[in-house]
Image (cartoon, rainbow, N blue to C red):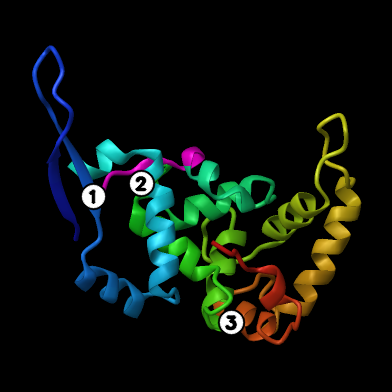
């Protein structure tokens, strides 16, 4: 998955040591370009961002996992996103509060404007499924409304509960095509890809 070249560092009074440089091979770069919706330049840019956080650890282990909070240092686009915790959790392959380079690559690919809208919609469904039950329930939609409206200057949810419930119920009635009381993946994708604003709002430029 990578090339590690060892080059001698400057000798010191204590002796000499080696430093490791980690890079992606041309073959693996080509494979990533085929498996994601990113071009090679974007992949290399994302790799350099990730490597800047832990160059030594990545040289020792290409699959090194960083705390998701560290990812925010190189993706400031997410820092003030009301869904950032859910986004990072969804794209963490081990759901352990950490991400590997490939996890970060999946995140940037899944939210790229070159990613097909039905694929992006499927990722969005997972992000909005806050309780992880593979359905968007009224509770998920209430939380969605509360996160979108944000907090006031005192740190309290800006919208009152009854208003959030009303908006969530309206959204549920629009999305719940089979009238089961919740929204499944196929229903969500079917409706969301027809919304012209979706492609512009669910995106992340790396």
Nearer to the camera, 49 or 124: 49
Where is residue 112 shown, x and y percent of the image?
54, 71
- For label 3, the residue is 117
Quarter holding residue 91:
bottom left
Q: Position of residue 60 (x, y in %)?
A: 18, 41
Quadrant where the C terminus sits is bottom right
- The CA distance from mark 3 to mark 1 is 34 Å
Q: Residue at x 50, y 69 (%)?
A: 110
Q: Is residue 127 magenta?
A: no
Height in image: 63 above or below 167?
above
Write the start and end of the magenta stretch as one range: 63-70
Q: Which residue is mark 2?
A: 51
- The numbered mark, 3 or 1, whose residue comes first in the sequence reads 1
Q: Is residue 133 above or below residue 192?
A: above
- Residue 45 placement, left or right of 137: left
Q: Position of residue 70 (x, y in %)?
A: 47, 39
Circles 2 and 1: CB distance less than 8 Å?
yes
């Amino acid at each position: 998955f990578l090339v590690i070249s060892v080059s001698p560092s400057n000798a010191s009074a204590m002796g000499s040591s080696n430093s490791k440089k980690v890079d992606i091979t041309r073959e693996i770069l080509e494979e990533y370009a085929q498996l994601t919706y990113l071009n090679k330049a974007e992949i290399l840019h994302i790799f350099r961002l990730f490597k800047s956080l832990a160059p030594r650890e990545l040289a020792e282990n290409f699959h090194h996992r960083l705390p998701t909070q560290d990812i925010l240092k190189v993706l400031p686009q997410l820092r003030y996103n009301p869904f950032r915790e859910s986004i990072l959790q969804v794209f963490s392959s081990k759901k352990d509060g950490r991400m590997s380079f490939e996890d970060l690559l999946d995140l940037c690919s899944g939210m790229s404007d070159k990613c097909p809208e039905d694929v992006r919609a499927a990722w969005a469904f997972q992000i909005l499924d806050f309780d992880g039950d593979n359905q968007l329930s009224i509770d998920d939609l209430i939380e969605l409304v509360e996160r979108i409206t944000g907090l006031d200057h005192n740190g309290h949810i800006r919208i009152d509960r009854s208003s959030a419930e009303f908006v969530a119920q309206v959204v549920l009635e629009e999305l719940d095509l089979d009238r089961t009381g919740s929204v499944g993946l196929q229903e969500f994708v079917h409706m969301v890809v027809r919304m012209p604003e979706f492609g512009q709002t669910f995106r992340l430029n790396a």
